[in-house]
Image (cartoon, rainbow, N blue to C red):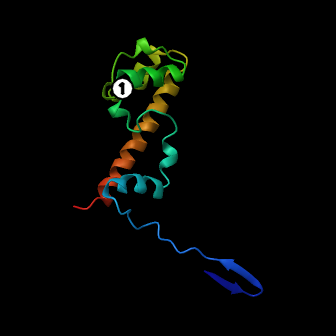
């Protein structure tokens, strides 16, 4: 479809990003895309750190310069750690590890809240 505005022709594309996909299983992925939250997932780790196992925790720690053997736990156990606990395990960059973990956790909680709000009851 095109329309004229003065001497210019502009192409219009009719679309509605708020319409859920036809397959029910794709709704969560579409909501993630529509909300612009797809950019939150920037590596191969699960988006919600509470679901991480020991392997994911180890990969995350090692990618940020820490030693995985200092974190023999899952993601739920990381949630219980304070900034001081991170710093005692990784003296020079523990505070950065803590900040990264808290950002990931807050993004996961915000996404969970969004899904709860848009889910039919």
28 or 95, which is in the foreground? 28
Determine whether 118 is above or below 65 in the image.
below
Residue underneath mark 1: 78
**How many numbered callouts?**
1
Q: Residue at x 39, y 42 (%)?
A: 108
**In which image quadrant can residue 78 be found?**
top left
Determine whether 33 is above or below 96 in the image.
below
Where residue 31 sits in the image (x, y, percent)? 41, 56
Query: Which image quarter is the N terminus in?
Result: bottom right
Instruction: Please identify the residue farthest to the right as the structure is shown.
Output: 7
20 or 114, which is in the foreground? 20
Q: Residue at x 38, y 49 (%)?
A: 111
Q: Residue at x 72, y 81 (%)?
A: 9
Where residue 112 sits in the image (x, y, percent)? 34, 48
Query: Which image quarter is the C terminus in?
Result: bottom left
**Seen in the image, is 81 located left or right of residue 96?**
left
């Amino acid at each position: 479809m095109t329309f004229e505005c003065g001497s210019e022709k502009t192409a219009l594309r009719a679309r509605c990003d708020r319409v859920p996909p036809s397959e029910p299983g794709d709704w969560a992925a579409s909501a993630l895309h529509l909300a612009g939250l797809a950019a939150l997932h920037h590596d191969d780790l699960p988006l919600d750190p509470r679901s991480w196992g020991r392997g994911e925790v180890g990969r995350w720690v090692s990618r940020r310069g820490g030693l995985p053997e200092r974190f023999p736990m899952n993601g739920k156990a990381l949630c219980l750690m304070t900034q001081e606990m991170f710093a005692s395990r990784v003296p020079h960059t523990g505070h950065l590890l803590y900040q990264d973990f808290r950002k990931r956790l807050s993004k996961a909680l915000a996404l969970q809240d969004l899904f709860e709000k848009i889910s039919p009851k």
